[in-house]
Image: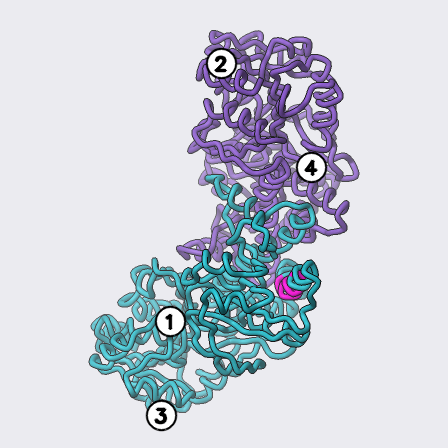
Chain colours: A purple, B cyan
């Protein structure tokens, strides 16, 4: 079974099924199609399927022509999981959020397994790419696959290979980002290496699914903690009258042993604010605590309050209150040069300022209209930035420093500018750093 | 005054005085002499002066011939601070340890100032290189210089330019490591840039002495926290049966957003375990807390106990106790390939194991005889490693993984090997990772 499957994968006669057509799954679809595989995409969101059927993209950095090219190669998308029988590989790219108690929510993974298990057959490989705690693949996926009576490692194959994406980074693609891969058994790993070997330049094998799960968590924990650290140091430096951005820039001239991370209004995106807590939850089972993760979470999630306090202080100098002030938030994507708003601290800032009585507005060249998202509702459209519109606000809050903004225009026409990104020199009279 | 001094510095007719001839000061002496300056070295330790007078080096990586070459260039060393009148620049490279309450101990800096202030004259520049908390230069050095009646920024000049050394790193030298520089006034900064401009390829100016002080602290805090994080994750991964070294290696294949740091038996050296607490102390004056630093300190300083517990568990598997066992510690320098033992966790391990009743020994190719150091006293000489000597120990503890060790020989002849550095594959029967 194993050798047959590996040969199908290597000759690209295998059909690839990708479950979850979001920021991770859709680029993977395109890459498999690009090298010549037939790909079937699965999603529970009918609107995504309809959009793709119209030959359109719903992700800014993916163009319509890329979708059309993949379709010429045979790519089709469906909500119908019975089509699982027609594919050889099942790559699961579904979200792993936190529930309201900030504990792992595996419902998307488990829902996917429930949908696909009835169609599992000999010669299937299932690869999980979602970020999750060490043990998920073995403890949650393995028993569900084996309840079919098929033997994993012999009849079917189970792989964990965490996605590695960096939205907005033009230097790397799905092909050129090395991919960590693990299998439940050695045979599973061999199949996993064949599955990814045709589409990714470098596949890095590790010894167990637990080690691969931990690898992805380490990558994101590293970022969450380093950002937490500079956020804490920003607050301390600010009290001492020191500009942390100048300090980070100077420290970054050290050619060894230091890597710059930058403070901001809080953590955003689907990974960094969420993933580390998957380890926190699992660690408790072993009687250990993830103290760095918890400290970073505490500091990072308090940053929006810090920024709101800075806005209040800044307005106060002009004898204004937040209540009744017109405040423009610049940038609502969670990081610069992308259109992704998941967990964006800008949205938290908009909400907090509105709750305090401000008239809020936003401008973001990547997001023309405030979309429907979980927990927040704003009937807003991106404000066009010009002299008059800028002058009409009591305070402008730079939250996400897209390269597309005209920073000169902004600072020259702002009455008051609160800068959470260190873009401006604080010696300018109308600028307050936050 | 300023222009005269800058001209003397640029034409190398200025005499450079370097105070503190240790790991930072002595390489700086050599570099100034190398480019053609006359240099006078000051130290309160007569044994260093005598050693240099004999044309000898007391630092492994500095050769006798480098000392002799500097002396040909006019370098001399003295304990006599009246010679301060004969130099133009005073560069202070003295230690800044913590006292027994882990608070900043500025006694070396203040002692130096007391010795040199009587000889201060117009045209002197004083540059502090010691790592310290933001505000030290302005709050401690400035008033002492101005009590002479000389005006800083006009008659004399005050600079803060933190040392950046990486012992054991062959890729960088005093010349090629960019140097951050600041001045109490703009004139002071100009003098500082001239002082270092002839000996360092890139001098990086920052806007205040406080920003420069914070820069050096940030560099070291970054390291202390990242090492603390991987140490915490090592303990968690170990409980989960995951090898953290494999995980770090896999994560390091990510080409963006991740930088590997490695766990170990604890923090060593004069900088990383100490410097961050300078900020901790100063932050309290501003009513803020350095929580990441304190957490990292707590975790890192608990690592030797973790290692001792691993040694106990490993011996226990062989039905042996630490008490009465012969234990060999490999590597007593605080990091690999150097001879520096300052704050080395290996020494803490030796002490703890001895206190538990072990017969301890060590082997270190860089340190033939256990030297006199603060707080510890061992009458030990480095054990030569061969089959017989290795076989004679109940347990071998790899603490510092010098490249000079013969790792094959060690593992092949060790009855039990506890590896704190991830050098060995744990599937080997006699290896326990710690």
Please give the chain letter of the residue carrying mark 4. Answer: A
Residue A231 drawn at (x, y percent)? 60, 52
The one of B364 and A58 positioned closer to us in this rendering: B364
Dot 1, how many residues are within 10 Å of its Cα: few (below 14), some (14-19), or many (20+)? Answer: many
What residue would you read off at disc 1? Answer: B188
| Distance Cα–Cα, label 1 vs label 4 | 59 Å
Asked if residue B231 is positioned above or below residue B386 in the image, the reply reads above
For mark 2, give the secondary structure. Answer: loop
| Distance Cα–Cα, label 1 vs label 3 | 24 Å
| Distance Cα–Cα, label 4 vs label 3 | 69 Å
What residue would you read off at disc 4? Answer: A135
What residue would you read off at disc 2? Answer: A37
For mark 1, give the secondary structure. Answer: helix
User: Which sits earlier in the primary sequence, circle 4 or circle 2?
Assistant: 2
The residue range painted magenta reads: B300-310
| Distance Cα–Cα, label 2 vs label 1 | 67 Å
Residue B168 drawn at (x, y percent)? 40, 64
What residue would you read off at disc 3? Answer: B82
Dot 4, how many residues are within 10 Å of its Cα: few (below 14), some (14-19), or many (20+)? Answer: some
């Amino acid at each position: 079974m194993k050798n047959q499957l590996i040969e199908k994968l290597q000759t690209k006669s295998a059909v690839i099924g990708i479950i979850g057509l979001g920021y991770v799954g859709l680029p993977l679809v395109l890459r498999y199609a690009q090298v010549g595989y037939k790909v079937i995409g699965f999603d529970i969101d009918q609107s995504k399927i309809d959009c793709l059927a119209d030959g359109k993209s719903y992700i800014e950095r993916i163009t319509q022509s890329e979708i059309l090219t993949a379709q010429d190669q045979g790519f089709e998308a469906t909500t119908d999981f019975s089509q699982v029988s027609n594919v050889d590989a099942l790559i699961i790219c579904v979200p792993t959020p936190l529930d309201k108690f900030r504990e792992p929510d595996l419902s998307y993974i488990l829902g996917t397994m429930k949908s696909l298990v009835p169609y599992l057959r000999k010669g299937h490989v299932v690869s999980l790419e979602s970020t999750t705690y060490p043990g998920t693949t073995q403890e949650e996926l393995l028993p569900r696959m084996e309840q079919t009576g098929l033997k994993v490692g012999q009849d079917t194959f189970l792989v964990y290979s965490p996605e590695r994406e960096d939205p907005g980074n033009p230097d790397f693609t799905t092909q050129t980002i090395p991919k960590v891969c693990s299998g439940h058994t050695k045979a599973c790993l061999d199949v996993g290496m064949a599955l990814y070997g045709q589409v990714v330049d470098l596949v890095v094998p590790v010894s167990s699914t637990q080690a691969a799960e931990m690898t992805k968590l380490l990558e994101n924990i590293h970022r969450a903690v380093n950002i937490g650290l500079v956020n804490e140091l920003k607050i301390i430096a600010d009290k001492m009258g020191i500009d942390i951005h100048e300090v980070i820039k100077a420290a970054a001239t050290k050619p060894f042993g230091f890597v710059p991370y930058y403070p901001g209004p809080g953590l955003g995106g689907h990974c960094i604010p969420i993933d580390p807590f998957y380890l926190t939850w699992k660690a408790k089972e072993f009687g250990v605590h993830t103290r760095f993760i918890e400290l970073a979470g505490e500091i990072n999630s308090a940053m929006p309050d810090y920024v709101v306090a800075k806005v209040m202080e800044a307005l106060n100098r002009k004898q204004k209150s937040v209540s009744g002030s017109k405040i423009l938030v610049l940038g609502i994507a969670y990081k610069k040069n992308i259109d992704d708003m998941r967990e964006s601290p800008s949205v938290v800032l908009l909400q907090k300022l509105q709750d305090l009585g401000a008239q809020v507005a936003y401008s973001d060249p990547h997001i023309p209209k405030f979309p429907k998202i979980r927990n927040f509702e704003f009937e807003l459209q991106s404000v066009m930035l010009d002299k008059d519109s800028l002058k009409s606000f009591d305070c402008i809050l730079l939250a996400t420093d897209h390269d597309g903004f005209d920073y000169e225009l902004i600072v020259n026409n702002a009455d008051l500018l609160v800068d959470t990104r260190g873009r401006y020199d604080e010696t300018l009279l109308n600028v307050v750093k936050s």
